[in-house]
Image (cartoon, rainbow, N blue to C red):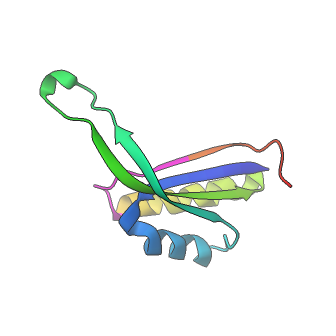
Amino acid sequence: MKMFLFCYPNWMEDVVLSEFTQAGYNSYMDLHGAKGKDEPYDDKQGEHHLVRKLRALLIYMPDEMIPPALDIVRKLKEKFPSEDMRAFSWMLEECF
């Protein structure tokens, strides 16, 4: 089993949940009120740190379900290229 985490802009809630439920990911935890901070690559350019309101989707799933979940993320990133989204997965040691 693995844990899948997808962080995305707050306004995308309906789009993201629709994509994942249509793909058969019906058990999930949707966290709202998360915050994220982007670190600029080059502070000398005068870029500022930006704190954003985010949502986080957590889904535990068998290993073989990770690639299709990442395909959904890729599809969303292509559809909304200017939005900052991140996906992560890791081994789930315990689940009860």
Magenta stretch encompasses residue 81: yes
11 or 62: which is nearer to us?
11
* Dominant secondary structure, magenta: loop
User: Residue furthest toward the right?
Assistant: 96
Q: Position of residue 40 (x, y in %)?
A: 27, 31
Please give the name of the residue rendered at 45% of the width and 69% of the height, measured from the top-left corner: 13
Quadrant housing residue 26: bottom right
80 or 94: which is nearer to us?
94
Q: Position of residue 4 (x, y in %)?
A: 64, 52
User: Residue furthest toward the left?
Assistant: 46
Please give the name of the residue rendered at 66% of the width and 65% of the height, measured from the top-left corner: 28
77 or 17: which is nearer to us?
17
Magenta stretch encompasses residue 16: no
In this rendering, would 23 be left or right of 54? right
Question: Total marks drawn?
Answer: 0
**In the image, which residues are magenta?**
79-87
Q: Position of residue 18 (x, y in %)?
A: 52, 76
In this rendering, would 79 be left or right of 27? left
User: Residue furthest toward the top?
Assistant: 44
Q: Position of residue 56 (x, y in %)?
A: 52, 56
Please give the name of the residue rendered at 86% of the width and 55% of the height, measured from the top-left corner: 96
Check the image and report above or below for 64 versus 92.
below
Check the image and report above or below for 29 versus 49.
below
Please give the name of the residue rendered at 84% of the width and 45% of the height, measured from the top-left corner: 94
User: Residue furthest toward the front?
Assistant: 33
